[in-house]
Amino acid sequence: MSTHHHSLEDAPLVPPMAVAILGGFLLCSLLIVATVRWSGVEIRTPDAPSIHIERLVFEDLPDGSIAVIDAESRRLTETIRGEAGFLRGALRVLAHERTRRGISDRAPFELHLRQDGRLTLMDPQTGVRLDLESFGPQHASSFARLMKREAP
């Protein structure tokens, strides 16, 4: 008669077959994703056409506010005072990329109003874009107020 008793400590925590099946699913998923990415297929939904574009230059002022200048007329359209955290953060992202590439900060950014109502902030100098609706309506509205002209 055997005195050896089976205990829970002897049993594997996860059956080997379950690990093999899970590993197979993971490998298949990675291969599918890699195939799609390397094939060049566009997986992003195309943007709605722009119905209005504001070309704006943003300048830091000595008092900490931000001057918003219309690039066409070179006129001051607005002065942003106070914290304006999201607006400052978005502009910082774009400015950082320009600095990294050695591009002048005097070139205008483009604020696109899309046919579907979405806003996109783009830097034509670097190709960087921020789809503002991704950050929620309150944050997008901080840029929406810069659309001064009536959209067609």
Image (cartoon, helix red, strand yellow):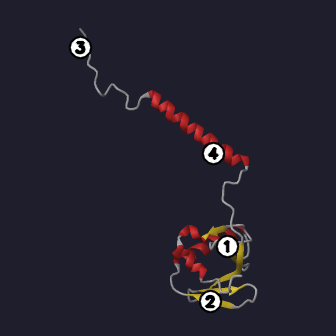
Judged by depth in the image, the label closer to the viewer, 4 or 2, is 4
Q: In the displayed structure, does residue 52 sit left or right of residue 134?
A: right
Q: Earlier in the sequence, mark 4 or mark 2?
A: 4
Q: Residues within 10 Å of mark 4 (few under 14, many from 20)?
A: few
Q: Residues within 10 Å of mark 1 (few under 14, many from 20)?
A: some
- Badge 2 element: strand
Q: Earlier in the sequence, mark 3 or mark 2?
A: 3
Q: In the displayed structure, does residue 133 sit left or right of residue 41?
A: left
- Mark 1 residue type: Arg
- Mark 2 residue type: Glu
Q: Which residue position holds label 3?
A: 3
* Between 33 and 113, the one nearer to me in the picture: 113
Say which residue appears at 40% left-offset and 32% top-offset.
Answer: 14
- Badge 3 element: loop
Residue 126, quarter of the rendered image: bottom right
Q: Residues within 10 Å of mark 2 (few under 14, many from 20)?
A: some
Q: Earlier in the sequence, mark 1 or mark 4?
A: 4
Picture coordinates of residue 152, whole percent (x, y): 71, 82
Q: Which residue position holds label 4?
A: 33
Given contact means CB atoms under 8 Å apart, are the residues at marks 4 and 2 in contact? no
Mark pair 1, 4: CA separation: 30 Å
* Between 7 and 46, the one nearer to me in the picture: 46
Q: Which mark is residue 78?
A: 2
Picture coordinates of residue 118, whole percent (x, y): 62, 72
Q: Earlier in the sequence, mark 3 or mark 1?
A: 3
Residue 150, quarter of the rendered image: bottom right
